[in-house]
Image (cartoon, rainbow, N blue to C red):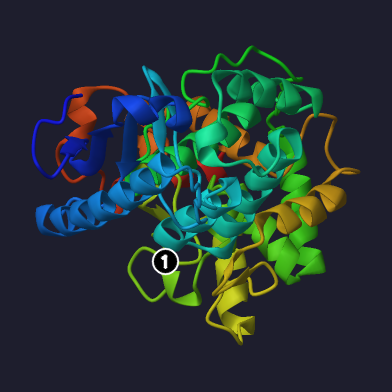
């Protein structure tokens, strides 16, 4: 980069940088032939003002260096480029600052679980490479962090999720701060590691026994299990329901499953209406009769977020003596799909009921299936031994 303008300005990704050649007789002292500093602005007016200020400060520094009075104060510019090797100003911007910035910008309107998950990933990273300056990140850090997660016993899917967050944090910081840093967590190969847990479906005869026991025990945890058993919902979807999402005063009783501030849905197709039949209808009726909260399951949901992990632990503990190995609360969802398939429900209606992504361009057009169409197949599901 040459001194192509009197303001010594250039841009990278629309962010202004100050770049100026160091006088020949001072390059040995400066340990560089060029001074470069990101101005952290996209405004040409602000960049021009900062350029004038930096020029004045630099010239004062160079005058002192010529007089061999080296008085670099901590607030004076220190970004240097040696040929193609950049040694840039660090300031105090560390990985912890990057995560703080990420949460400031991205956590708005997100459930508390988002912050907890992000903080956990930050701990994973810092415990391996330390809370270093962003501009000290090296290509090897990506591979080292991956190996660290493998050593902790995380599965391939979990490692990829962690890396997804870390990449987003670093990318956002690079963009917001105008840093000339390569993200070492992008493009890191993650091998197939960790045991893949196979979730088995629950046999229909076992489902019937569990449903009957839920009616006998008749408490909020059993209502939750019963609601899942004939709707195929994800646990977090059910836990995050409002009482108002349960529509019983209609021709077709149903759940209006939609995103809330405390509980997002996994995909756009996850937003759906599910007719209530069988034991799930009973559970919905019990919730409305006994409810004294806006939340269908206040034990597992508040305005701060959904406690799906807590629900999973409690419900799986109760189920463990009633189901075979490999079956957990999520197995009701696997069984739901198998039961619909057994009554020859069309695959696109199966996907619509379960909120699964449907392959094919045609699935993106039209208004989907009506409640009475869905109801027909759910009645088939509960009226048979499928």
Q: Is the residue 262 above or below the residue 295 in the image?
A: above
Q: Position of residue 6 (x, y in %)?
A: 9, 42
Residue located 60% across and 51% down the image: 96
295 and 64: which is toward the camera: 64
272 and 379: which is toward the camera: 272
Residue positioned most to the front: 67
Q: Is the residue 319 above or below the residue 192 in the image?
A: below
Q: Is the residue 161 above or below the residue 41 in the image?
A: above
Residue positioned most to the right: 321
Question: Split into 4 quadrants, where in the image is the C terminus?
Answer: top right
Q: Is the residue 357 above or below the residue 296 in the image?
A: above
Q: Position of residue 359 (x, y in %)?
A: 31, 23
Residue 149 relative to residue 190: left or right: right
Residue located 42% across and 44% down the image: 67
Can residue 377 be seen here? The reply is no
14 and 147: which is toward the camera: 14
Question: Split into 4 quadrants, where in the image is the N terminus?
Answer: top left
* Quadrant of the image occupied by residue 254: bottom left
| Disc 1: which residue | 109
Residue located 50% across and 56% down the image: 73
Q: Position of residue 82 (x, y in %)?
A: 41, 22
Circle 1 crowding by C-alpha within 10 Å: few under 14, some 14–19, many from 20: few
Classify mark 1: helix, strand or loop.
loop
Residue located 46% across and 47% down the image: 379
Q: Position of residue 122 (x, y in %)?
A: 64, 46
Can residue 74 be seen here? The reply is yes
Residue positioned most to the bottom: 292
């Amino acid at each position: 980069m040459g001194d192509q303008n009197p303001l010594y300005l250039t841009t990278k990704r629309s962010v202004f940088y100050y770049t100026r050649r160091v006088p020949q007789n001072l390059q040995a002292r400066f340990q560089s032939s060029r001074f470069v500093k990101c101005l952290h602005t996209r405004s040409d007016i602000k960049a021009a003002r900062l350029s004038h200020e930096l020029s004045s400060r630099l010239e004062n520094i160079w005058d002192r260096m010529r007089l061999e009075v080296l008085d670099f104060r901590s607030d004076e510019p220190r970004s240097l480029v040696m040929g193609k090797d950049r040694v840039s100003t660090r300031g105090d911007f560390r990985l912890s600052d990057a995560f703080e910035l990420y949460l400031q910008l991205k956590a708005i309107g997100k459930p508390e679980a988002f912050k907890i998950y992000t903080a956990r990933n930050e701990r994973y990273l810092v415990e391996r490479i330390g809370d270093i300056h962003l501009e000290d990140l090296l290509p090897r850090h990506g591979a080292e962090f991956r190996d660290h997660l493998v050593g902790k016993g995380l599965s391939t899917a979990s490692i990829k999720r962690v890396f997804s967050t870390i990449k987003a944090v670093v990318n956002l910081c690079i963009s917001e701060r105008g840093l000339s840093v390569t993200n070492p967590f992008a493009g890191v190969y993650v091998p197939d590691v960790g045991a893949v847990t196979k979730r088995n479906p629950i046999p229909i005869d076992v489902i019937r026994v569990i449903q009957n026991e839920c009616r006998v025990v008749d408490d909020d945890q059993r209502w939750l299990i019963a609601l899942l058993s004939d709707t195929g919902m994800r646990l977090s979807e059910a836990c995050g329901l409002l009482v108002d999402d349960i529509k019983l005063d209609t021709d077709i009783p149903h759940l209006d499953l939609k995103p809330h501030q405390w509980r997002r849905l996994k995909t756009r197709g996850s937003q759906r209406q599910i007719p209530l039949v069988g034991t799930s209808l009973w559970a919905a009726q019990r919730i409305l009769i006994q409810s004294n909260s806006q939340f269908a399951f206040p034990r597992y949901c508040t305005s701060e977020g959904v406690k799906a992990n807590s629900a999973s632990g409690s419900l799986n503990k109760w189920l463990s003596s009633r189901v075979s190995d490999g079956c957990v609360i999520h197995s009701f969802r696997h069984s739901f799909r198998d039961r619909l398939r057994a009554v020859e429900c069309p695959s696109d209606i199966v996907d619509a009921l379960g909120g699964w992504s449907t392959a094919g361009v045609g699935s993106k057009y039209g208004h989907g299936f009506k409640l009475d169409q869905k109801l027909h197949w759910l009645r088939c599901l509960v009226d048979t031994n499928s």
